[in-house]
Amino acid sequence: MTMRKTIARIMLIILILSISQTTAESATGIRDLFQAPEITATPAPNAFRFRNGIRWGMSTQQVKALETEPMSERTMQSWAVMLTDGKVSVSRFAADLVFMFREDRLMMISYEFTKALQDDFLYLSGALSSVYGEKSEADPLKIKVLMDAINPNYYKTEQITQAYGWNTPDGTVIYLYYYSADAFAIMYASPETGSSIYQTNGL
């Protein structure tokens, strides 16, 4: 009787060990099924998106893949500039589209309207406000500093008039301003431009 009990206990222990091992293997398999996939870099929900899904920080090749208009390229200072060969549609108008990159990262974008009327300017001011909220007056010097980083002294501060600005939740700043008597621009500046435009050596 004692021998039978001993054998029964051994068999029970073997059975328990076998079940435990199977359960452990099953649990590992289940964990594998529910393991989170590798996280990829995705933009924050409030990240600024330009036409065709273009975003800040994209490379020249990524922008080319999304922007359907043919573009010319040039290098100015430490910046790469891509300009559409033809005008693009903006609201109910046509404009030249310029992408500006530093270290192959998209940092600024502008629409440039030439031979433009004051009514066109006012219309686009209202259109921008309908998307980005109430406008505020912008400092022409800030706009000049941004453009000087690419093409020094191309703009004179006194040429920049009727300057207005809008801010988006991610820190993008949008400017609407005249840069000559019959030409104005909408410029989009990424949140990174605030720390990278000024020359700060020795400060």
Image (tube, rainbow, N blue to C red):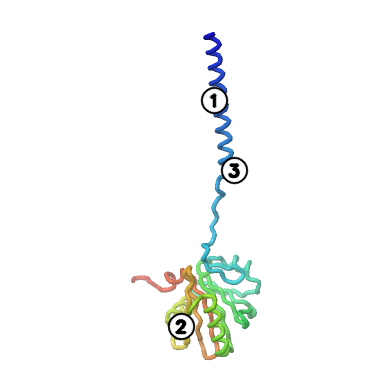
Q: What residue do we see at 60% from left, 80% from top?
A: 96
Dot 2, how many residues are within 10 Å of its Cα: few (below 14), some (14-19), or many (20+)?
few
Relative image position of residue 172 (x, y in whole percent): 49, 71
Mark 1 falls on what kind of element? helix
Residue furthest to the left in view is 203
Residue beneath disc 3: 33
Q: Quadrant of the N terminus?
A: top right
Q: Earlier in the sequence, mark 1 or mark 3?
A: 1
Amino acid type indicated by mark 3: Leu
Q: Nearer the viewer, residue 90 or 83?
A: 90
Residue beneath disc 1: 17
How much space separates mark 2 and mark 1, taking CA atoms? 81 Å
Would you say the residues marked 1 and 3 are in contact, meaning their CB atoms lie under 8 Å apart? no
Q: Earlier in the sequence, mark 3 or mark 2?
A: 3
Give the mark toward the camera: 3 or 2. Answer: 3
Q: What residue do we see at 56% from left, 80% from top?
A: 127
- The disc label shown at residue 153, or none: 2
